[in-house]
Amino acid sequence: MGSDHVNYRAVVDRSGAIYIPTVGSINVAGVRYSELHDYLQSEFGKTYKNFQLSVNLGRLRSIQVFVVGQARRQGSYTISSLSTLVDALFASGGPSKHGSMRTIQLKRDGKVITTFDLYDLIANGDKTKDAKLASGDVIYIPPMGPQVAMAGSVNTPAIFELKDRTTLGEMIALAGGLASTAAGERVLVERIEDHRIRKADEFDLTEQGLVRELHDGDVIRFLHISPKFENAVTLRGNVAVPGRYPWHQGMHVSDLIPSRAFLVTDQYWNMQNKLAVNAQSTGLGVKQAQLKNDVKRLSSEINWEYADIQRFNAQDLTPSLVVFNLGKAIEGDSEQNLELQPNDVVTIFAQNDIQGPTAERAKFVHLEGELKKAGVYQVLPGETLRQLVNRIGGFTPQAYLFGSEFTRESTRVDQQTRLNQYANNLDQSLARSTAAASFISDATSAEDEKANLAEAKNTVDKVKGLQATGRIVLELKPSAKGVDVLPDLPLEDGDRLLVPFRPATVNVIGAVYNSSAFIYKPEKNVSDYLRLAGGPTKSGDKGREFVIRADGSTVSRQQHSVLISRSFNALRVMPGDTIIVPEKLDRGATLRFLKDFTAILAQVGVGAAGIRAVFP
C-alpha cells in the first residue's frame, strides 16, 4: 500500500470560496484562521479517509471601504477581503450618539445592497443580514430615527430607537423583558401629540395592549409592585435569626417565638466554641490571668420584661406601638401573648438596650484573696457586698480588711474621664508656658527654662499614660475584723473585691534618697520612715508630702495647719501604706501648674502603683 503527498495552493475567490480538485468548492468566508484547520479537516473527511492535513495561510488581499454619515470615526478603511459589514462597523467604532443603529446601509455602485439593524445583532444575536464587503463599498450610517424611553421595572431601562411601527411588546423584548418586581398589569405612557401638547396615557399589559404602536418621544414607565408583604411579620433585635416570618390567621407571639431557646444568638454559641477551641489548643482552658475574666455572660442578656410590636394602621395611616412582657408571652400568658397582625414588627431588646431595674439584671462579682471561698459569684437580687461575703463563708484569719481593694467599672470610667481632663489641662498649660518661653531674651535664662519645660513635658507624658483603677474606699478601720464591718454596699455587675493578707512593709517613694519598702513596725511614724529612706532630697518638696493609705485614702501634710505640722510627722503608719515626697517644682514660674499633681492623681483613683510609675 502506498501513500500520496499532495500540495494544493488555493485562492479565495470573491465569493469567499476555494476550489480543491477531487473535493470541490469549499466556502471559507467568515472562518477564523485558528478554526481553519479543523474546518478543512472536516470538509476533506467527506471525501478522504486516513489522511493528514496541514494548512498555511498566504498573503490576504486587502480592500478599501468607506464609512460615512453618523459614524464615530468616519473615513476610508483598508481591511481584509474576507471582512463583512459588521467587521467594518466595529473597526470604525459604530454609530455615533446621533447615528442610527437600525437602518445602516451598505452601498455598492450607487445601489443599496443591504440595510442592517444592529439591534438584531446586539439584542438577538442575529447576523443573517450581514454582508461580505467588496473594494469601494460605502457604509452609510444615517441620523438616529424616532426614539422612546423605557423606564422603571424593566431589565434594561434605556432610550431605544424605533423602526417600522414598533409595538409595545417588541420594545419590551428589546429591553430584556419586565423585571421581577414589575407590576404586570399596566404601564404609564407620556406622549407628545402633534408636536404641540403632552398627554399621559395608560396601556394594559394584555394581548391588545402589547400590539399598540409606540410614537416618537414616548416615555414608557413600568410600575413596580409594592414592597409590602401581605402575610408576613418581622422579628428583629436581640434574636438568633432576625428576619421576616410567615403570618397566619390567629397567630400570637408564642407562635413566632416558641421558646426562650429560640432567641439564643449565634454570638453565644460562637463564644462558647471559641472557649472550647482555646481549651483544646492550649491544654489548659486558658491562661490563669484570663480565666477569671471569662466567667461572665457570653452574650447580651435578653430583656424578658419588655418587648414591643410596631404596627401600621392601613385605615388612617398612623403608626402605633404595643408593649408586652416577653417572658410571660412565651409562657402563654393570655394577656401578654398578643395576637399578631400582618406586617407587624416585633422587637426583642437586650438588657443594655433599655436599662431596666438593677435588681432584675444578672450580675457577676469577683471575690479574690483572703476569702474562704474566693471565686466569681452571681449576685442574688438586691444582695449587698456584706451579704455576698457572708453567703460564701467570710474571710480567712490572715485577711487584712483595712487594705481591701474594692473596684467598680462605672467608677473607673468616671475617674478616667476626670484623669483625662486633668491631663489635657496640664498639656494646655505646658503649651502656654512653652509659648511664653520663646520671648525670653537672656540666653542663660532661656536654657534653664528649656530644661524646666523638658522636665515638665516628661512628667505630663507619664500622667497622660496613667489608668484609673476604679477603686472605692471602704473606710474600714485598721483593726477591722469579720464580715459585719463591711458596708451594705449594693453590688454592680463586674465589681471586684480583693482582700490581701497583712503586708509586712511600708513604701517610701518620690524625691527621697532611697525609694524602697521598709519593714513595718507599729511604733514607727511618717518621720521615722522618711528617716529610713534618707529623708527628702534637695529637690524634694517637704511641704507637700502625703500618704496613700492601704485602704486607698489620702492624708497630706497640707491637711494639717502650719502650727501642728508636727502631727503629720507623727502620723501613725499602717502596713501597706505608701509615703510620697513629690518633686519641688517651683524652680520656675512655668512649672507651678504641676505643684499639686501628685495629690490630684491620688484623688482620681490612680493609686500608689500609678504614682510610682511617675516616680520610678
Image: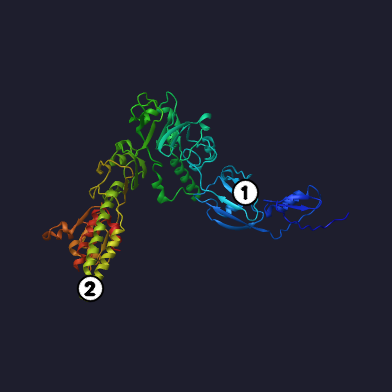
Q: Earlier in the sequence, mark 1 or mark 2?
A: 1
Using the image as rendered, state which of residue 214 and residue 364 is in the foreground.
214
Residue at 48% over, 35% down: 182
Q: Position of residue 98 (x, y in %)?
A: 49, 49
Q: Is residue 582 visible?
A: no
- Residue occupied by mark 2: 446
Instruction: Determine the CA span between mark 1 and mark 2.
Output: 98 Å
Tag 1: amino acid: Lys
Q: Say which quarter of the image contains residue 462.
A: bottom left
Using the image as rendered, state which of residue 124 and residue 134 is in the foreground.
134
Q: Are marks 1 and 2 in contact (CB under 8 Å)?
A: no
Using the image as rendered, state which of residue 571 and residue 57 is in the foreground.
57
Q: So how many labels did they put on this image?
A: 2
Tag 2: amino acid: Ala
Tell me the element at label 2: helix
Q: Position of residue 566 (x, y in %)?
A: 14, 60
Q: Is residue 233 visible?
A: yes
Residue at 23% over, 52% down: 553
- Residue occupied by mark 1: 111
